Amino acid sequence: MVALAPLLALAFLAASAHAADPFAFFDWDVTYMTASPLGVPQKVIAINKQFPGPVMNVTTNYNVVVNVLNSLDEPLLITWDGIQHRKNCWQDGVLGTTCPIPPGWNWTYNFQVKDQIGSFFYFPSLGMQRAAGGFGGITVNNRAVISVPFDTPDGDITLFIGDWYKKNHTHLRKMLDDGKELGMPDGVLMNGKGPYRYNDSLVPDGIEYETIKVEPGKTYRFRVHNVGVSTSLNFRIQNHNLALVETEGSYTMKQNFTNLDIHVGQSYSFLVTMDQNASSDYYIVASARFVNESLWTKVTGVAILQYSNSKGKASGPLPDPPNDEYDKTFSMNQARSIRMNVSTGAARPNPQGSFHYGSINVSQVYKLRNEPPVIINGKKRTTLSGISYSPPDTPLRLSDLYDKKGVYTLDFPTMPIDGPPVIRTSVINSTYKNFLEIVFQNNDTIVQTYHIDGYAFWVVGMDYGEWTENSRGTYNKWDGVSRCTTQVFPGAWTAVMLSLDSPGFWNVRTENLDTWYLGQETYIRVVDPNGGYNVTEMVAPDNMLYCGLLKDKQKAQKPHGSSSSSASAAKLNNYLLVVLVSLLALALGH
């Protein structure tokens, strides 16, 4: 095996001397392991035997290299939610751009967190796998030369919250294939652990729970991610204030909450000061929202905040959730109140507010409407604008590269179609540097959250009822928050605007795993009319996987099996050597 440490040191010294952007290397083995988060042994997806997976801690403009070894018994892709793969959709980790990593194979992701800061997470994107784990955090820090709009916290804490089923993801998948509802989850996990036994009748004895240890008087940054299946959660810490400062790559106007609704796929950063008297430990709570609370009492995650001078265990009732009985707009007003801090820089020296999105001429308008599930060709499906997306065997971007016709159609409607729903691979056709307005109209009875890969968008408006052109009069065209995942309340709409500055194919989807799995997604095809391959868009990576119509181009890879450790290590070393030699050449060439 090659000794990499001296080469790493030499390469980084040389590269840094010439102001090259640093590299961060990760080597992951994605496997099954047995865990009992709700007291019942079950198969979960772990990364390097960790559940949840490790937090990737990097800094703006780092080049990130992640070697992923698929030790599962089914294909795998990892997607990097919220990471804006500038001009590089090949690394996006979804079926529209990349062939899955077969069982026993490895694939190395290579992307740059260019001009980006904030709190994000990664997860496996195929076949409901996130319902079994495989998720972890991505923390992108400011470069030292760029100030942060708040004092440096005394600690940084990542917290994953999400609903959880005792059934494994393959069982959940079969239920959906058979036309069944997933039903009520079995609980809510916090950092992969079940609830603290705050109530003997609701929580069985012997369940491991999360404890976060803190020092009195200090302030901590909590990065909270809802990585669940489909449940919106209300997050709160007993007797503590939540000062919201960032969400999915945007610093927000600092705002104090006693609780905040965090919807599936969303991430928030709070500053929490330990200013209580520590007469006992404190509850950290994530409880289900917009449900029958009398039936869903067990679907509550509870962790413990423990001061170093705590005088005893937490006891008594949990802090109350919001009471929406007489204020149906409480959660929407919370969301509307979150504004971008336009007076501060983020990843770049220039203030974010210098980009006046509200004064840009819109190139295209799309209204994407979802309905309750429907039966199409005898199967239960979900739709966007009357179309249920069917992923082809050949990734969309790969089919374009090799000029394979008939893989998809460019006929996604600008407005919802009135005819019977259909299943097809229809994508949005757009152009590099276009400015899009997308309206998500939720005509279902549950909250949906929508995500656009590769982009942050401005959330300019949301309201109940049906969106019309007159709704634009309510838009926030100055300091709407820029993020990658937004909630759309049932019977309501949310409007976003985005600048198409990255060519390629980019996934538009609901983050709710069940409705995503059943077809509620599409892609935006962003083409540079002047060509631009290798100029405005990254070229396909040398380690490209092939499948579908291009499967004959794929060379066999030796499955890692029982002797995988040395084989995979050698493969990673070879890849790292290529990167390091390139770095050295770049440095010495100056």
Image (spheres, helix red, strand yellow):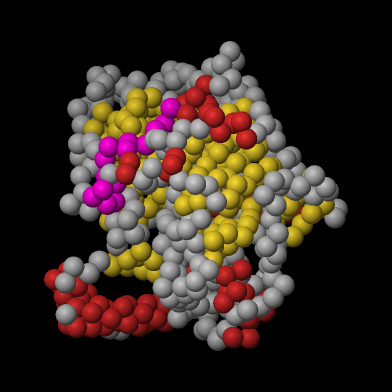
Res 344 → quadrant: top left
- Residue that sits furthest to the top in the current view: 326
What quarter of the picture does the N terminus occupy? bottom left
State whether the magenta stretch is mostly helix, strand or loop.
loop
- Judged left or right of residue 480, residue 396 is right
Q: Classify residue 65 by image quadrant.
A: bottom left
Number of numbered discs on residues: 0
Where residue 66 sits in the image (x, y, percent)?
39, 67
- In this rendering, the answer to whether 413 lies above or below 22 is above
| Horizontal and vertical percent position of residue 184 | 65, 36
- Is residue 584 magenta-colored? no
Q: Is residue 372 left or right of residue 142?
A: right
Residue at screen point 38% across, 42% down? 356
User: Residue 28: x, y in percent?
Assistant: 41, 66
Vertical position of residue 257 compared to residue 108: above or below: above
Stretch of the chain drawn in magenta? 337-350
The percent coordinates of residue 396 (x first, y second) are 61, 68
Pick the residue in front: 75 or 279. 75
Left or right of 15 in this view: 570 = right
Residue 252 visible to the viewer = yes
Residue at image position (16%, 80%) is 590
- Which is more toward the observer, 492 or 351? 351
Q: Nearer the viewer, residue 61 or 355?
A: 355
Q: Is residue 196 left or right of residue 447?
A: left
Residue 583 sits above or below residue 70 on the image = below
Q: Is residue 204 visible?
A: no
Q: Residue at x 58, y 28 (%)?
A: 463
Q: Residue at x 20, y 36 (%)?
A: 151
Quadrant for residue 423, please give it.
Answer: bottom right
